[in-house]
Image (cartoon, rainbow, N blue to C red):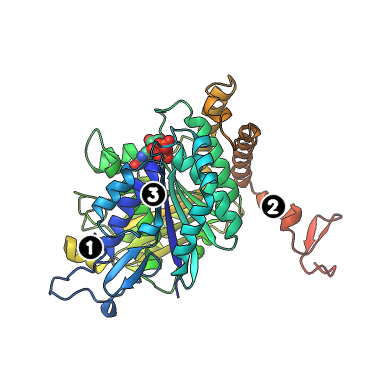
Amino acid sequence: MTGEILTIQVGQCGNHVGKQFWDQLTKEHGIGKDGQILESSNGNSTDRIFREDDTNPFFKQYQENKYTPRAIMIDLEPSVINDNINYFPDFFDPRGTWVSKDRYGAGNSWANGYDEGQKNQDIFLNMIDKQLDSTENFEGFQLLHSVAGGTGSGLGSNLLEALADRYQKKLLTTYSVFPSDQSEVVVQPYNTILTLRRLAEDSDASVVFDNNALSNLSGRVFQKNQTDYNQTNQLIASVLSSTTNSVRFPSYLYSSLQSIFSTLIPSPELHFLTPAFTPFTSDYITGGMDYKRNTAYDILLDLIDEPNSLVSKHSKKPIYLNVFCTIIGDIERNDISRGINKIQQRLQFAAWSPTIIHVNNGRRSNYLKNLHGNQSQVNGMMLANSSGIVPLFEKVCGSFDKIYSKKAFLNAFQQSENFDADDFIESREVARSLIEEYTAAEEKSYLDEVLLEDENVIGEFNENNNEVDAEGDNIM
Ligand code: GTP
């Protein structure tokens, strides 16, 4: 049985993104905004017996034909959560919703968010435990948040620490939005570096988005100069829904999130993933164009084109460690093999990496076909683990160094109950070592170095010939 996933939405961005995510999931599973099963075109309710999909990983069912998302919504101010509740009346479980009584937000300070997280940690863990009571084979968490405000970053960081500590064996993933270059708030670099540390230390896999790439991409797909968060977040939701496609429309492969992320992550430190998606058709975004002639081959090649990435790339060619793609729709197997061959030639993989492009053939929901016409559509999503993430980390460090070297804007942090000033230095150090790890992973010798680190050695290390005796029996 596929395990259940609990989605935790924190702060304005996390809850905004969550809205689009649940909007997409309800469409794909034929569920109305109130959680009721929708009538199909022939007048029958889309009864579970006839379903090809598995709603259980993301929804619980208290009554027949009524679905409730496995979700926790947390914010320090009420507007976005209220908007979600109005948009989806009687959908979210009130026991999974928490808004601060003070209702002021964290004022864009990580430290305020962290304090609130600490103060209310028992309440949050209790809310989470209540959601886990309705699971039989709980797989893990996915946190949706921004790293740059106060609540999603600070409260989100505190929650990540608590979850990593309390549910050590469960998968802990994040979908983390990094800020654009036009920093709206001066302390964003502080918030970002402190959160990056928690992503590095406490999450098992972090799918990264950056608002620069998102605003360029949404300008293009929505064909507008100015787009709003509702639109941007539909792009993020497209990645989220297609990452989980094989869990919700089960097949033999990739039936758990663990199986997807473990193909992508060669060692625990290297767990930052960059997403790409194409094309954004009406299955995924409002007013999307439909492309009827795409083959899996076209889509696979489009996915490695820079403009389809949801993280800005930079001039230096990244070295790839692992790649996972989901191609959704009816496709020819042969097109996939041709696409894989071509990508293997075009992308540069680390010499130690197996250079396998993992491709899952995802299913296009029948409910989407009813909604948007039964024409054949093919969409693709790629998650890549590559050194292409390094420029983003460098940018985060550069912005931090600029203000921290002057010890500027430290007030909010100094007043905090739980903030230790060394956290800045330690977080900066974690960011530096992340950059180093990804840079080292570009080298042929990376795996040797990883193997030689004590905790990674299985068997005994022979110092005379620099080899590892796997059995420890002196036979190499
Ligand atoms: P406080 O407002 O301090 O309580 O924290 P918060 O976590 O609620 O803040 P927020 O989520 O607004 O984080 C601010 C950062 O997130 C900025 O970089 C914004 O550009 C970005 N952001 C806010 N909302 C959204 C959203 O809906 N989508 C995207 N892509 N980015 C968002």
Q: Amino acid at mark 3?
A: Ala
Q: Residues within 10 Å of mark 1 (few under 14, many from 20)?
A: some
Callout 2 secondary element: helix
Residue in view at x 46 percent, y 63 percent = 130
User: Which x, y percent locates residue 441?
Assistant: 61, 47
Q: Earlier in the sequence, mark 2 or mark 3?
A: 3
Quarter of the image for the N terminus: give it.
bottom left
Q: Give the quadrant of ligand 1.
A: top left
Q: Residue at x 56, y 33 (%)?
A: 416
Question: In terms of secondary structure, where does tag 1 sit?
Answer: loop
3D distance between C-alphas at marks 2 and 3: 29 Å
Q: Work out whether 311 lies above or below 125.
A: above
Provide the residue designation for mark 1. 32
Q: Are marks 2 and 1 in contact (CB under 8 Å)?
A: no
Whole-Å distance between the Cαs marked 2 and 1? 49 Å
Residue 302, visible in the rendered structure:
no
- The tag on residue 450 is 2
Direction top: furthest residue: 406
Whole-percent x, y for residue 282 in the image:
22, 54
Q: Nearer the viewer, residue 424 or 225?
A: 424
Instruction: Give the number of the disc on residue 276.
Output: 3
